[in-house]
Amino acid sequence: MPATAPMMRLNLSLLNGLNNNYLKNLQTFLSQNVSLTTQEPAAFFTRSDRGGTFSSEQREFSMHKTLIGILFSVWLTLCGADSTFAKNRDPKYQKAVSNALEYLAREQRRQGYWEANGGQYRVAMTALAGNALLAEGSTTTRGKYARNIQNAVDYLLEMSQPNGLIGYKNDYHYTYGHGYSMVFLSQVYGEEEDALRREELKKVLIKAVEFCASAQTTRGGWGYVSAKDGNDFDEGSTCITQVQGLRACRNAGIPVDKKIIDRAKKYISDCTTQEGGVQYSIRGGGARPAITAAACAALFNAGEYDSDHLKNMLDYCKKNVWPGGNANRYFGHWHYAHFYYAQVMYRGENKDWDKYIKDIGQQILRKQSASGAWMEGHVGPVYTTAINATILQLDNGYLPIYQK
């Protein structure tokens, strides 16, 4: 950009949650070419009257919205340039992912949702499938799956209830969908260019965080439903979805009380056995490899990386979750286990990730059907396909919540 070119204003909150290395590169570019502001978008995205005339500040942003899109594209390029997947992976993986995403695109209902077997878990399936499409690099406005992602966002926004729950109150597992939706919508929020749409997403996410806080049990965990609806019952797997959802919101600039996360971390610690396995719940139930892997990912998200407690959990996972061995140890939750363990391995040493993704990738590819879906598991092919496609795309680097 010429030195005499006018300096432009950009909202820094668009950059929240990006990988540190990518952010450094992008900030270097911005510092040389763009005048930055930390002002919230709502402060200068206002209507001047009820007739819908835009303020001068909003007109200015409209002129510069293209710049934001370009800068986000720069970030995507920086991510892609560092992608082990793009440089070193067998083309069979890329073909498998392409077929999987095409399957998901075909399975999306016209109302914007996906569903599990029997028409169940629409909110959770929509968020998971939407994340798999985001991992490809598409956004709500750009890429092959932009329309699918936009429709998924529309559906989840419609599912936001007055109390902040994203989902159906009569769904007896609604906290799963709520947590996954916080992850998906917060990542969309970080990319959203339209001021009014961004404000709508922000309000929904703020309410979602508030609901999550009120749903936490007295012991610091979460159950399948809120503490109030579930008589203060809690268990490990739903706790993980809430912690990750809260962290994704915080990454996107949504306020999250640190006390909520601290209580959740203590809950995970209280559920951990001496050998490092995390139990089904604080009341017992035995150490579960799948929940332990998910708990490690949640602690990473919560900012815990080097504690002796976490190292003990990681050692347990290496013995009990690493690809191969007795599949019965997963208690029927192989995909749940590796959805989170893949995140753990990706955020670890490169050599460990390279070995893990080679081993797990071979297992995943062997079971893919001609339709592009994975048909195993009782939840259904949308679930298993979204999970496997996300695992195979982690090192694309497009999802901030999963970055190193």
Image (spheres, grey):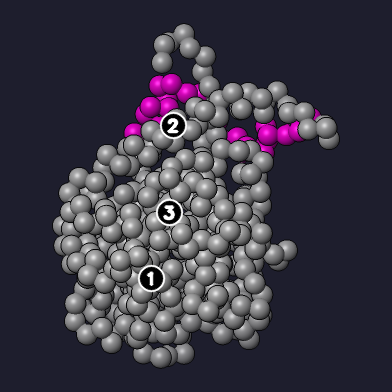
Nearer to the camera, 99 or 379: 99
Tag 2 secondary structure: helix
Residue 43 is one of the magenta-drawn residues: yes
Nearer to the camera, 274 or 249: 249
Mark 2 surroundings: few (<14), some (14-19) or many (≥20) residues within 10 A: some
Identify residue for label 1: 384
Tag 1 secondary structure: helix
Residue at screen point 48% across, 63% down: 107
| Part of the protein shown in magenta | 25-48
The amino acid type found where label 3 is placed reads: Leu
| Residue 116 appears left or right of 55 | left
Question: What is the count of numbered marks?
Answer: 3
Among the two numbered marks 1 and 2 on one chain, the one whose residue lies closer to the N terminus: 2
Whole-percent x, y for residue 172 in the image: 59, 81
Residue at mark 3 to residue at mark 1: CA–CA distance: 14 Å
Above or below — where is 191 with respect to 237? above
Residue at screen point 64% across, 72% down: 168
Residue 310 visible:
no
Residue at mark 1 to residue at mark 2: CA–CA distance: 34 Å
Residue at mark 3 to residue at mark 2: CA–CA distance: 21 Å
Which of the numbered marks, if any, corresponds to residue 133? Answer: 3
CB under 8 Å between callouts 1 and 2? Answer: no
Whole-percent x, y for residue 296 in the image: 34, 69
| Residue 73 appears left or right of 258 | left
Nearer the observer: mark 3 or 2; the answer is 3
Nearer to the camera, 261 or 13: 13
Residue 199 visible:
yes
Above or below — where is 229 with respect to 194? below
The amino acid type found where label 2 is placed reads: Leu
Identify residue for label 2: 71
